[in-house]
Amino acid sequence: MAKPLPTPVRNHLTGLRILLLFTVLCGLAYPLAITGISQVAFSNQANGSLVKDGHGKVVGSSLIGQNFTVTSADGKTVSPDPKLFQSRPSAAGTNGYDPTASGGTNKGTNDAGLVTTYTQLKSDIATFNHVAESQVPADAITSSGSGLDPDISPAYAGIQVDRVAQANHLTDAQVQALVATYTQGRTLGFLGEPRVDVLNLNIALTKLG
């Protein structure tokens, strides 16, 4: 008759079997099951909530904002595209909206350059959209906490309507109708604020133009 293994050895073997069991369950079975369920029930969200244009080309994600710019002929200057609605500023990464560098400006009221920066930005936005500085809303000059916010306020979209309409040779009414279509209300009717889906709005605008 084989001699029983020492108690410490048996305990270690039992622990090893439990480790292997839970490695298979939690490290393989559970992730595969959740991945399969998400692909079937929430395929778009599971794959990054990607947005495609009319030609089926991926142009962004509905969860992450982006800059809408044009580059000069000599490739030296990058500026906001007057034909498209502009997103709010982003401090995530060098050029903004970098998902690997999510974060805000981290500037507080004691920052010496805060007022100067926002004052200049407000002036630039007012000039770009041909409106008074008093009409420029807060989200037009401040970044979100994550720096990745894909939406803007109806107020910010509103001051851009005339500029976008003129640049695309459309009427204000046509552009306002698009803005209304891509304006989402408060979540569940009471959470958050109304917001405008900038990416899909610009895709629709490009098709209309």
Image: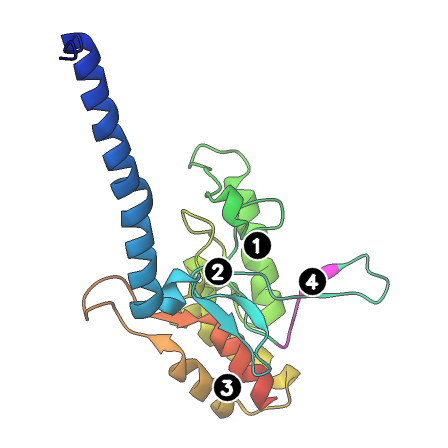
Residue sitting at x 55%, y 38%: 113
Which residues are the magenta region?
78-83
1 vs 4, front mark: 4
Residue sitting at x 37%, y 64%: 45
Q: Which residue is mark 1?
A: 121
> CA gap, disc 2 to disc 1?
9 Å
- Most foreground residue, 1 or 172: 1
Q: Which residue is mark 2?
A: 140
> CA gap, disc 3 to disc 2?
19 Å
- Most foreground residue, 86 or 58: 58
Callout 4 environment at 10 Å: few (<14), some (14 to 19), or many (20+)?
few
Q: Which residue is mark 3?
A: 175
First-in-chain label (3 vs 2): 2
> CA gap, disc 2 to disc 4?
16 Å
Judge whether residue 82 is colored magenta: yes
What kind of element bears circle 4? Answer: strand
Residue sitting at x 43%, y 71%: 197
Q: Amino acid at mark 3?
A: Val
> CA gap, disc 1 to disc 4?
14 Å
3 and 2 marks in contact (CB < 8 Å) = no
Position of 80 with respect to 76 (left or right) is left
Position of 72 with respect to 51 (left or right) is right
